[in-house]
Amino acid sequence: MVVDTIAAQLRRHYVDADTGQLIAEYILRRAAAGTYDTITDPYRLAARLTADLGTVNHDGHLSVHYAPDMPTYPVGPEGLKLGGPPGPLPPEVVEEERSAHYGIARLDVLPGNVGYMDLRSFPESPAAYDAIVNALRYLEPTDAIIIDLRRNGGGSGEMSNFLISHFVGPDSTLSLRVINRSGHEQIDRWTLGKVPGPRRPTVPLFLLTCRATGSAAEDFAFVLSNLGRATVVGDRTYGAGHNNAFLASGYGFVTSISFTRVMDPRTGKEWEGVGVRPTLPAEPEQALLVAHATAVERLAASATGPRRKEYMAIHEALEAELHPRVVPPLMLERYAGRYSGGQSIAFVDGRLAFRPRAGFLSEPLVAIGDSVFARHASDRIIFAHDAAGAVVMSVVTLNRGTLSFRRIDGEAETPAG
């Protein structure tokens, strides 16, 4: 009975009529062969049906759930209409989004005044919009922005458009076209002419993606890339390019069915099945470093004087992290010890770490050369030997110049030179 209902829903609502018919026929043949007869646990049956629905065309939005209390999409005589179930969100959804900080896992300012937002979802509760605006205000003084979508499986298309609108001009721009076979409608989506947060239409913008980036997160990357407003860094996205609706299929089962095609209104291109391709391909684990290095390099191109020098120093350090230099361990061990002025160098897990004072946090150093290391990205620590053969450490900072310290180990602390 449940399989018959799902098959009818596929025929009536699935985004492509012919494909919906093929998927429906497949699960009906499986049912006729007795595949589902021996599965008595509803959760196992939902999992089996989900696997079978994905056999024909691997649509990531097709799934079956046993969820008797789950809100479902209203279906009228005209079919499914975009906009979703009416009324407020269930309290448990609102609380889940609140406890997850509305998808904002981390806000930071990276070396070079590059803003960073780790965004894990596109939530839909009203408070989420305020949270996004506050995050954008925090990042407003930054010179470039990186938004990390590598752990973002999607969410609300309206929230995606809301955030997109903060990175384009005030003139509304046609960004997406949605075609709904079930409801016989075409909807063109435009960016918002007015936004409550800071609008930054020219800030260098980088988006981090991988195969886990899905649905509304792909919408976000797709639109900003097509508009020429963002550099996408990493791997291609999942490829879930259809809107989906959760439909009641009887006996507590709910089926997620794709019912729209979503495309670029200028080219007709979609991301369903193929994902959003990166502008700058990179291994997902290195995407942040690649984006950060690229952002700083671009900022350096338009900077002058000390600012340009700082950018170039940061870029050099980031490139050294991307392409680690192998320094012989015996050489690193010779640099380790206590230095005059209270500083110390430790050799831990094959790397050096600098501690400015006892009780301060230690800072890992990045090897630029055999005796030159980056600290805080823009500062440098250089090791050499004096006439007596003692190790001397020079700490070079952009603001304070160079200070040198001699390794003393068990000796009394005295300044070098």
Image (cartoon, helix red, strand yellow):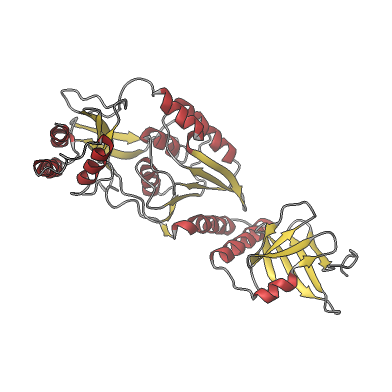
Residue 85 sits in quarter = top left
Say left or right for 23 vs 364.
Answer: left
Residue 86 location, quadrant: top left
Nearer to the camera, 173 or 409: 409
Task: In the rendered view, tell whether residue 413 sits above or below residue 263.
Answer: below
- Does 194 sit above or below residue 366? above
Lateral position of residue 344 relative to residue 1, left or right? right
Looking at the picture, tell me which residue is in the foreground, 285 or 194.
Answer: 285
Residue at left offset 22%, top offset 36%: 40
Where is residue 402 shown, x and y percent of the image?
79, 63
Q: Position of residue 194 (x, y in %)?
A: 45, 30
Q: Quadrant of the N terminus?
A: top left
Q: Is residue 329 visible?
A: yes
User: Residue 58, percent across and down?
Assistant: 24, 49
Pick the quarter of the image with the C terminus.
bottom right
Q: Residue at x 63, y 74 (%)?
A: 327
Tell me residue 31's x, y (percent). 12, 41
Nearer the observer, 158 or 340: 340
Q: Is residue 261 visible?
A: no
